[in-house]
Amino acid sequence: MRWFYLVILTGLTIFAQEATVISQPVNPNRVFSTPTANVLNSLDVLLSGGSVVGLEEERYFLGNIYAGFGNLMELEVSTSNFVDALKKKSATLPASSFKMTFLPSNSAFGLSMLVKKTLWNERTLDTYKYYTRFSDVFVILGYRKEFFSLNVGFNLHDMRIKTYSYTTGEMSDEIKKEEYGVFGNLLIRANEKTYAMIEFTPASRVSFPSEGSISPDDIEQVYAVTLGGRYFFTYFFSLDAGVLYRSDFRGPADAVINVILNLAVPLGKAIQK
């Protein structure tokens, strides 16, 4: 967590000298957790971090770093998650992603592909340890005008889980579960500094057994909807806030509040000065 604060402070120091190169709000290339069809400008960097507060146990810090290259592709180092049914909260995994656009950046229409992969996550229950990782492939179609942006797409979610038994000292074969879903998001400009945002997206819910190896039947798909907004303090510094509700929740008391800060660092424009 400390490294992310250090990056934020470094970015703010850069902007003490370079903030004048931004002449309009820099919208992050996502809406809460779902991607948009556009990519960052070449050599521009976006830093995002915040917290998630929901159930008593569900409080954790998120940090993402995005970088654009050649107005064509984008790399991301971030976190991703799945729903742990036993803990009734999201399990967070380190992740990296690659995004590529197939249409010019000045076009009103957008078409892009994003691939995200996580590292292994460990979960211990009694005499068993469960290892979990997954990959996501997004195909994104977008349309944007001055006052709104609409993005819809297809998502392939590939989850892998294997089980280690402390009793026998054996590791199970890796199981695979593929899920397909659709997602979408909408941004509407409410005023000069504010956007209203809504998104819907699928998520995987894993029911870890109290003992024994996990099976594909223990993994199911749920859907989440997030409603909120984005406020720009300056053209390069913004706040995202919203409320998330999932299809497996039992009522409003389970709703999750997302708060995210975004800092844009236009290194590409600064280098050209």
Image (cartoon, grey):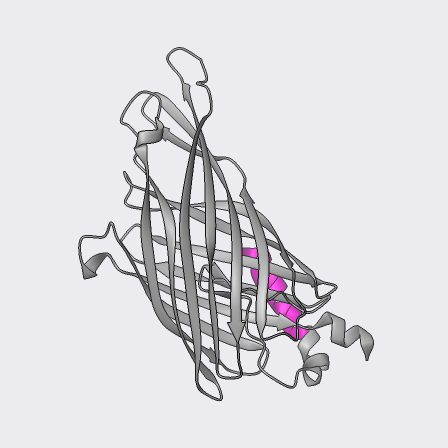
Which residue shows up at 44% across the image and 64% down it? Answer: 32
Outermost left residue: 251
Outermost top residue: 168
Q: Position of residue 67 (x, y in %)?
A: 66, 61
Does residue 120 show up magenta in the picture? no
Q: Is residue 85 left or right of residue 155?
A: left
User: Who is closer to the viewer here, 218 or 260?
Assistant: 218
Which residue shows up at 47% across the image and 58% down it? Answer: 153
Q: Is residue 178 left or right of residue 224?
A: right
Q: Quadrant of the C terminus?
A: bottom right
Q: Main secondary structure of the magenta part?
A: helix
Image: magenta residue range: 1-13
Asked where in the image residue 38 lies, by quadrant, the reply is bottom right
User: Who is closer to the viewer here, 143 or 77?
Assistant: 143
In the image, residue 233 sits, relative to residue 199, either above or below, namely: below
Which residue shows up at 54% across the image and 39% down it? Answer: 119
Q: Position of residue 162 (x, y in %)?
A: 44, 25
Q: Position of residue 128 (x, y in %)?
A: 36, 23
Outermost bottom residue: 192
Which residue shows up at 39% across the image and 56% down it? Answer: 201
In the image, residue 56 sits, relative to residue 135, either above or below, namely: below
